[in-house]
Image (spheres, rainbow, N blue to C red):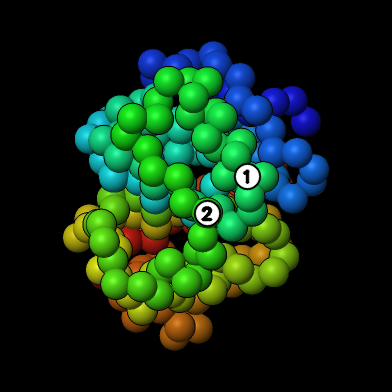
Amino acid sequence: MSAPRIIGGVARGRRLNPVPGDSTRPITDRTKESLFNIIGADIHGARFLDLFAGTGSVGIEALSRGAAFVRLVDKLRQAVQTIRANLALTGLGENAQVLQADAFKLLAQTPDKVFDYVYIAPPQYKAMWEQALLALDANSGWLSPDAWVIVQIHPVEYRDLVAAGQLKGLLEFEQRQYGSTLLVFYSLR
């Protein structure tokens, strides 16, 4: 897979460093472009939380397109180093915060910021997306009233957590599939 790149905004065309090894799965340009076409101009001035950030590609894309603040979270030291290097490469570090942290422990804490977008793209096939979504549902103080939570998974991982009665505050409102990537969108009820 080629190196991820920024596809829109002030850092458009910049290639990002990949995380060494095979611990992350970068989002494809097509999926990322579609995601930001869906978000559209609402990214301007938004607060964006990128969980399981990997290279930082999605959060840095949000900054490039005008997000006011992006927090990028990953547990792996190599990923955090890569994110910091990519922020330096793009010159977009001023409005970013990089945390080496366990996303589940972070979401269990008392929120210190409210976010307009939360992007969840964990390692595949481990139901970690469900765990993160349930943690946000249980601690929705992280979310602004009109926030979107966006999950990136392989289509075979999908389960309807609303129909299963597992989500009390979040409601699924959209799905988009791009090859072997499924984006699932949630908002507060």
At label 2, the amino acid type is: Gln
Q: Where is residue 157 in the image (x, y as percent from the top left)?
A: 67, 65
Q: Is residue 43 left or right of residue 77?
A: left
**Crowd rating for badge 1 (residues with CA inside 10 Å; few <14, some 14–19, many 20+):** many
* Alpha carbon separation for disc pair 2 and 1: 9 Å
**Foreground residue, 82 or 120?**
82
Q: Name the residue under label 1.
A: 79
Residue drawn at x 26%, y 61% is 112
Examine the rendered structure and indicate whether residue 181 appears above or below residue 133: above
Examine the rendered structure and indicate whether residue 46 appears above or below residue 145: above
Residue drawn at x 25%, y 57% is 113
Q: Name the residue under label 2.
A: 100
Q: Is mark 1 on a helix, strand or loop?
A: helix
Q: Position of residue 141 (x, y in %)?
A: 25, 68
Q: In this view, does 51 lie to the left or right of 22?
A: left
Q: In which quarter of the image is residue 148?
A: bottom left
Residue drawn at x 28%, y 50% is 116
The quadrant of the picture occupied by the N terminus is: top right
